[in-house]
Image (cartoon, helix red, strand yellow):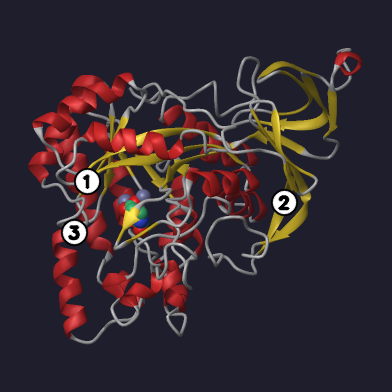
């Protein structure tokens, strides 16, 4: 099956060119000046992309489908979450398999493989959350490298749940230095945060806003500084997840200036949301409870994060998609409302896998903060390179997977739960008008979305055995 996308403007992280794109089966096999090749005659399918941008599919390297958290589960399954991702222009995601305390890493990995297999609409890979660093866990990290799981997340947050102490984190870092893996850190000082949370509750400060107030910027900046120091000592690559605070990213920038393999991601919620959202009345602020928390607009974190994306001190934007319903979920029951009257019991996480591409296109290109090329880089190319999937993923080039989105830059879209497909009952950006409209989404040559319809099915997506980070110096 051959498909010709003709007359479009092909945009990658480095190019902006009028071109026809020829796809044979799952791969891009030709890129040429419009009409310069006789491709139309033999093509099985022709898609006209006049006045449209033809861009690589989005890659979201931070999602949590079905994550157990706070007495419930993230409401999207691999089936619903990957379908929603496709609707939002994302054609690959990397989710987190989880080892909980007392369980073996390999058992957690196998559980997540089973959850995903046969259910995904788009290609998927896994990072591994190492919830308990033991001798066996360290051995399993080696095994996973051979399975294409080349990145391991540890936590200085969530004491008693996923937290590891500094010594255990350092041991995992030494292992990564040895086997070539990347350590991903959730960097917040969970011990100090727990004290602040207890004190707030004792004072009767129970509303969602206190979730952010009890996780002050210094708790993220300090933990980021600390894990960078340990990673430099161990000699492993370090990737700090869901960064929300300018002082924390400044630590990443300093480390990068020293020549260290230190990287950072941020997420749309930190670029667009703040305390005004957490303060929404009638417990509506719970919609925006996630960790790290959304921050105080007044302190300038949002614009600083955009600037750090422009200067490449932050390399990419993921979602940390981890949805919980405000009302009762049909099978999972009460979710966000578990924390009514006690913000510490609100499940942490927000929906976003379907929103990311539109929101970042709007904030970057629509509002003039990043170039179109940089938009492609932070949403697709950098995620592919950071986690060992480039150039199979993350670009439009001969030999690459035909993971392609076609955008109308002159149309607009209203962000709304009404238009979304995630298994959650709200949109964090409800009512926001964004520029640009995703018209077509193709994954490995297969059109998943066109004419406002979904044409995919569970099992279209394949497991990606990833390589090691392609950014290391
Ligand atoms: O609030 C969040 N981020 N929930 C998901 C778990 C994590 O820490 O990434
Ligand atoms: Zn985290
Ligand atoms: Zn996460």
Q: Report helix, strand or loop for mark 2.
A: strand
Q: Residue 206 or 21: which is nearer the viewer? A: 206
Q: Residue at x 65, y 20 (%)?
A: 26
Residue 265 lies, in percent from the top left, at 40, 45
Q: Residue furthest front?
A: 331
Image mark for residue 190: 3
Q: Which residue is mark 2?
A: 436
Q: Report helix, strand or loop for mark 1.
A: loop
Tag in front: 1 or 2: 1
Q: Residue at x 22, y 41 (%)?
A: 228
Residue 336 lies, in percent from the top left, at 40, 70
Q: Report helix, strand or loop for mark 3.
A: helix
As drawn, 277 above or below 193 = below
As drawn, 155 above or below 458 = below
Q: Residue at x 45, y 52 (%)?
A: 321
Image mark for residue 100: 1
Disc 2 crowd rating (10 Å Cα; few below 14, some 14-19, many 20+) is many
């Amino acid at each position: 099956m051959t498909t010709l996308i003709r007359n479009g403007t092909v945009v990658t992280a480095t190019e902006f060119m009028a071109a026809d794109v020829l796809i044979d089966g799952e791969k891009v096999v030709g890129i040429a000046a419009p009409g310069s090749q006789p491709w139309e005659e033999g093509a099985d399918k022709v898609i006209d992309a006049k006045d449209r941008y033809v861009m690589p599919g989005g890659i979201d390297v931070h999602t949590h489908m079905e994550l157990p958290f706070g007495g419930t589960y993230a409401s999207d399954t691999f089936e619903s979450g990957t379908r929603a991702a496709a609707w939002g222009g994302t054609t690959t995601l990397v989710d987190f398999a989880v080892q909980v305390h007392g369980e073996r890493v390999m058992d957690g990995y196998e559980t997540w493989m089973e959850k995903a297999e046969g259910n995904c609409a788009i290609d998927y890979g896994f990072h591994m959350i190492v919830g308990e660093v033991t001798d066996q866990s360290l051995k399993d990290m080696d095994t996973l490298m051979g399975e294409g799981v080349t990145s391991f997340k540890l936590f200085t947050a969530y004491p008693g749940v996923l937290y590891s102490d500094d010594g255990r984190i350092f041991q995992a870092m030494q292992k990564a230095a040895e086997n070539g893996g990347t350590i991903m850190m959730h960097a917040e000082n969970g011990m100090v945060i727990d004290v602040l949370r207890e004190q707030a509750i004792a004072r009767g400060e129970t509303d969602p806003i206190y979730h952010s107030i009890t996780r002050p910027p210094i708790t993220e900046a300090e933990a980021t500084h600390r894990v960078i120091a340990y990673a430099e000592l161990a000699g492993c690559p370090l990737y700090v997840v869901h960064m929300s605070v300018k002082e924390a990213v400044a630590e990443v920038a300093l480390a990068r200036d020293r020549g260290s393999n230190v990287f950072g991601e941020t997420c749309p919620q930190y670029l667009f949301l703040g305390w005004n959202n957490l303060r929404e009345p009638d417990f509506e602020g719970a919609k925006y409870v996630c960790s790290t928390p959304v921050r105080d607009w007044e302190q300038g974190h949002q614009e600083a994060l955009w600037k750090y994306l422009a200067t490449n001190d932050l390399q990419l934007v993921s979602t940390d998609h981890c949805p919980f319903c405000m009302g009762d979920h049909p099978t999972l029951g009460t979710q966000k409302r578990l924390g009514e009257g006690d913000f510490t019991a609100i499940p942490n996480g927000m929906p976003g896998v379907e929103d990311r591409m539109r929101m970042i296109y709007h904030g970057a290109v629509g509002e003039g903060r990043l170039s179109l090329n940089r938009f492609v880089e932070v949403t697709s190319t950098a995620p592919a390179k950071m986690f060992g999937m480039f150039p199979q993923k993350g670009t439009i080039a001969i030999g690459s997977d035909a993971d392609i989105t076609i955008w109308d830059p002159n149309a607009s879209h209203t962000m709304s739960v009404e238009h979304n497909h995630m298994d959650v009952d709200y949109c964090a950006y409800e009512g926001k008008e964004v520029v640009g409209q995703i018209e077509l989404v193709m994954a490995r040559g297969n059109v998943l979305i066109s004419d406002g319809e979904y044409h995919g099915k569970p099992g279209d997506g394949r497991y990606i055995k990833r390589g090691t980070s392609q950014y290391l110096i």
